[in-house]
Amino acid sequence: MTIVQVEFNTMITGLGMLCATVTGVTGYYSAYYKNKTALLTTNNVLNRAHRAFGSFATTLYLLGFFAGTVGFVGAILHNVPPLELDSLSFNIHTWGSFPVALIFAWKTYLAYFNKQLLYGKRKWLGMALFLAWVFTWLSAATSYYLRTQPDNLQHPPPVFLLPYELLRLQLVLPFIIGGVIGALIVKKAGTTMSETNGERE
């Protein structure tokens, strides 16, 4: 079995969505449920998980962004892959990726160089990045799958991803798996906080 590049790129995006879901769960738990963004630095479990999965998501996004940029340039210069300006899925995914890249760049800059601003006045930016990931994953996967259909066969059917008939399940899998992982992390973090509070008492 051979995997084609476009399916590989879609898998990368799906894994990035999974990691972004984990960071979204831990970030939401800290910033909104507990209303204490400081937990992302003071709670060891949350801190390690948020940083690790955030780094994974960043790396996977950059890989996908590079592949997408190369494909976009190839479409403009050589029409390979086809520059499908009359395709709704192509236009939604392609042009929507530009504002997503700006959100990603802003959030990444603050995460590495100005965490105080991110955790304070800009804590909503984490959720904005999660929604940007949602857009990227759903539009990329849908665009890929539409091009595996007999009436628009640009790519062979998926080998490692689920078949087109299970598209809806494939779309929600990163959220389900990431949500379960995030919930387990939050549960562990809550346990450590309870143990710490008990020791103080």
Image (tube, rainbow, N blue to C red):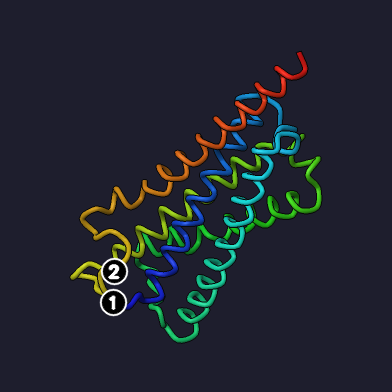
Apparent side of residue 27 relative to residue 70 in the rendered image (left or right): right
Image depth: mark 2 or mark 1 in front: 1
* Image-based side of 177 in relation to 110, left or right: left
The residues tagged by marks 2 and 1 sit, at their Cα atoms, a distance apart of 7 Å
Indicate the position of residue 19 as horizontal and vertical percent values.
53, 50
Q: Residue at x 80, y 52 (%)?
A: 113
Rendering coords of residue 72 (x, y %): 50, 74
Q: Residues within 10 Å of mark 1 (few under 14, many from 20)?
A: few
Asked if marks 2 and 1 touch (Cβ < 8 Å), the reply is yes
Going by the numbered disc 1, the residue's amino acid type is Met
Image-based side of 93 in relation to 157, left or right:
right
Where is residue 86 shown, x and y percent of the image? 35, 67
Return the residue nearer the eye: 125 or 163: 163
Task: Classify residue 82 by image quadrant.
Answer: bottom left
Q: Earlier in the sequence, mark 2 or mark 1?
A: 1
Q: Which mark is residue 195?
A: none
Q: Is residue 114 above or below residue 141?
A: above
When the figure is inspected, residue 119 is found, relative to residue 160, above or below; the finding is above
Q: Which residue is mark 2?
A: 159
List x then y, in percent, for residue 29: 60, 30
Residue kind at label 2, given as amino acid type: Val
Q: Residue at x 65, y 37 (%)?
A: 124
Residue drawn at point x = 51 percent, y = 36 percent: 184
Q: Residue at (32%, 78%) from the top-left corner?
A: 2
Q: Quadrant of residue 30?
A: top right
Q: Which residue is disc 1 drawn over?
A: 1
Residue ranking furthest to the front:
199
Judge the density around disc 2: few (<14), some (14-19), many (≥20) Cα neighbours within 10 Å. few
